[in-house]
Amino acid sequence: MTREQVLESLRHLQDPVYGISMVELNAIKDVMVKENSVAMSVVLSTDDEGRKEELRREIAGVLNRSGIADVHIRFREMSDYERAEAAKKANPEPVKPTPTNLLAEGSKTTFIAVASGKGGVGKSTVAVNLAVALARKGKRVGIIDADIYGFSVPDMMGIEDRPELVDQLIRPVERYGVKVISMGFFVQDNAPVIWRGPMLGKMLRNFFSEVEWGELDYMVLDLPPGTGDVALDVHQMIPHSKEIIVTTPHATAAFVAARAGAMAVHTNHEIIGVVENMAYYACGQCGHKDYVFGRGGGAKLAEELHTKLLAQIPLGAPDNHPSEPDYSPSVYKADSDVGQMYLEVAEAVIRQNETEA
């Protein structure tokens, strides 16, 4: 037998104090093999004569059955250093999870930034419902509320919990199958955010790299309206993001939204479509459509940006009631008319992404 074969044949021997293999503890030492004999040292965690005799019989029996006639064993007690090393092996430090850096090279997460030229067009509503629709289609989804000054995603999704800090990593809140991080989780009593640009940029980068997202198929980004510092930071952090532009049908809103589209093109983002929000008001009794904010803005913007009009979402709010267990102010039910529209947008996004892949 070789030394390795001797150790392998004794691997079943368990240390009574540390509960793992004596071979793994390195308690069987100085193994010498010569023709028909084996000599070794055995380090004991307890000074027990009965234990010595038991091990002597067990080791000799195993090696005798393997053809070794002479077995010589020397016993000694563990030193303090050996006890410390044995304790480490028996109770290793738990491996701390490392955050999934979504910005790392080789990341398979598809980023979808939802942008608008101005506030008040329902950009965050579109971002939230798109994220939920992607999750309903079976995708692993996260959403970052990158609208640092105007954070609203937690409230819109009916989230009352806060992220947990586990092993110095932030664990996002999950709602409707979507993992959520927002500046709103880190301010008290809806306080205003008065940070300057560099601090906000650092916070956003932490959202990407210091949160335990796990594996994601899609990350939806609710960008601040317009083309300010925060939006520019996001564009520069994620050079290959895809983008959806949100506008209302009004010609002026579409004109302003074109600036956000131009910024996306300038930073090499791919515009995958336009969502026209508040496109019309449908009468609940007769179904008649009243075009409150005019018509044609979304189609005109899509044409100008050389992309497609993904959806025309009517003016309204989800038919949700606070007594419902999964209540949220802004997430449409999957079986509602508007919920179906968002599922169609999600299907279009998935189809385009899979085609490119």
Image (tube, helix red, strand yellow):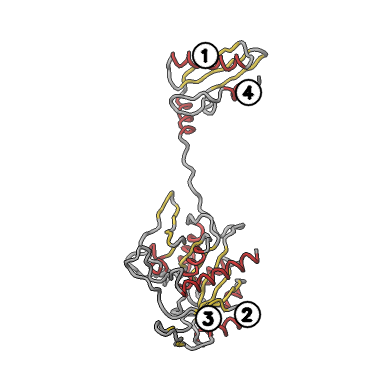
Q: Position of residue 147 (x, y in %)?
A: 45, 70
Cα gap from disc 1 to disc 2, whole angstroms: 84 Å
Q: Residues within 10 Å of mark 3 (few under 14, many from 20)?
A: many
Q: Tell me if I can see residue 161 in this picture.
A: yes
Question: Quick one: 156 or 326, which is closer to the camera?
Answer: 326
Give the residue displayed 60% in from the left and 19% down from the top: 31
Q: CA distance from mark 4 to mark 2?
A: 71 Å
Real-space Cα distance between discs 3 and 2? 14 Å
Frontmost of labels 3 and 2 is: 2
User: Image quarter for residue 287?
Assistant: bottom left
Q: State the image coordinates of residue 66 (x, y, percent, origin top left).
A: 62, 17
Q: Callout 4, which amino acid? A: Gln
The answer to whether residue 118 is above or below residue 107 is below
Residue furthest to the top? 70
At horizontal 48% and vertical 15% (from top left) the residue drawn is: 54
Picture quadrant where residue 352 is located: bottom right
In the rendered image, which residue does mark 2 sit on?
306
Residue that mark 1 sits on: 57
Q: CA distance from mark 4 to mark 3?
A: 73 Å
Q: Find numbered disc 4 in the image and state the secondary structure of the residue it sits on.
A: helix
Circle 4 crowding by C-alpha within 10 Å: few under 14, some 14–19, many from 20: few
Secondary structure under badge 2?
loop
Give the residue displayed 46% in from the left and 75% down from the top: 337
The numbered disc on residue 257 is 3
Residue that badge 4 annotates = 5
The N terminus - image quarter: top right
Structural crowding at the residue carrying mark 2, measured as other residues with C-alpha within 10 Å and reported as few (<14), some (14–19) or many (≥20): few
Viewer-proximal residue, 128 or 167? 128
Badge 2 amino acid: His
